[in-house]
Amino acid sequence: MNKQTVLSGIRPTGYLHLGNYFGAVQNFLRMQDDYNCFFFIADIHSLTTHPTPENLQSGVRQVLAEYLACGIDPEKATIFIQSDVPEVSELYAFLNMNAYLGELERTTSFKDKARQQPDNVNAGLLTYPVLMAADIIIHKANFVPVGKDQEQNLEMARKFAKRFNRMYNKEVFPIPQPYTFGGGDMIKVPGLDGSGKMGKSEGNAINLFEDPKSIRKKVMRAVTDSGPTEMNQQKPEAIQNLFTLMKIVSTADTVTHFDGLYNNCEIRYGDLKKHLAEDIIAYTSPIRERIIEILEDDAYLAKVAKMGAEKARESASRTLNEVKDVIGFRKLF
């Protein structure tokens, strides 16, 4: 029985953080044996923000090393760099012919990015959902893990796949479904700013590659209040977020200890933050050390990237050949 295919990508514009790790990567590790998994580094997507060549290259290396350090196995899964698979760009061009200006202009991601970078509203921002669709359907993915901010783009990918199948009267592409990791298995990791989830763009994240000094500094700046005024009172969101982080990285006894201090109005947030910071450091240090080790091994990184590109191109070329035949691109001579 063939395994179903799952595809996920990340832009090389920053580091993986605790939110990525607990929210998705740990689930990916469990999926490697049961699904045909593709994990890619979306370096073409990142060009919408015009990174320098140096930043683009270092970002790709960093994310590749972090994926590997977290435990994604290149022998079980396909880890590849988007630009190493030119078939994606060719399918992107074909799909653009059947993507309409009005529907692209209405996407939330385009409108948000156009507001964020009004001096750089490029065509890549407009057709971002088309490239994302090409990434997904070229491997005939059955499932795509997505967050709230990408739900509409996945829906666009579903639309483009259905439209292609309908236009050419052939079921070339399966219709990709959102993958939610079983709902309750997904951990929402809060940020350090007192509200919302941890995220790179929000500036409230702790990266897996973060050095201990920086972690301590960030945690000590985390938002708190003046402390409880009544026994057993409900924790406000900012304080509950710190306890949620503690439940993720600390022992149950530690959580119970500080919870008791809070309920008895004896909590000292400075002590809690210091303990939390050291527990985060203890948790992330082995991963950080592994990232450093991998980053120093250019031969291993090159081997993984080459192997991933070969596996991804084999999958992509099969689909692209089928697409070209259906469209009518056949050699006449």
Image (cartoon, rainbow, N blue to C red):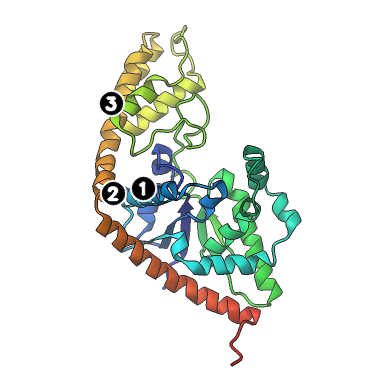
Q: Secondary structure at mark 1?
A: helix
Q: Quadrant of the N terminus?
A: bottom left
Q: Residue at x 33, y 24 (%)?
A: 216
Q: Which residue is mark 3?
A: 278
Query: Considering only vertical position in the picture, is 13 above or below 237?
Result: below
Q: Which residue, as the protein is rendered here, is positioned at the far bottom?
A: 333
Q: Which residue is mark 2?
A: 295
Q: Nearer the viewer, mark 1 or mark 3?
A: 1
Viewer-proximal residue among 283 and 200: 200
Q: CA distance from mark 1 to mark 2?
A: 7 Å
Q: Amino acid at mark 3?
A: Glu
Q: Looking at the image, which is closer to me, 299 or 171?
A: 299
Marks 1 and 3 close (CB-CB < 8 Å): no
Task: Name the residue type under label 2.
Answer: Leu
Quadrant of the snapshot with the C terminus? bottom right
The residue drawn where x is 39% and y is 29% is 245
Q: Is residue 287 visible?
A: yes
Which numbered disc, 1 or 3, marks the residue that appears first in the sequence? 1
Local crowd size for mark 2, using a 10 Å CA cut-off: few (<14), some (14–19), many (≥20): some
Q: Quadrant of residue 248?
A: top left
Count of number-bearing discs:
3
Would you call the spot at circle 3 few (<14 residues within 10 Å), some (14-19), or many (20 or more)? some
Left or right of 229? Residue 66 is left
Whether the residues at callouts 1 and 2 have beta carbons within 8 Å, the answer is yes
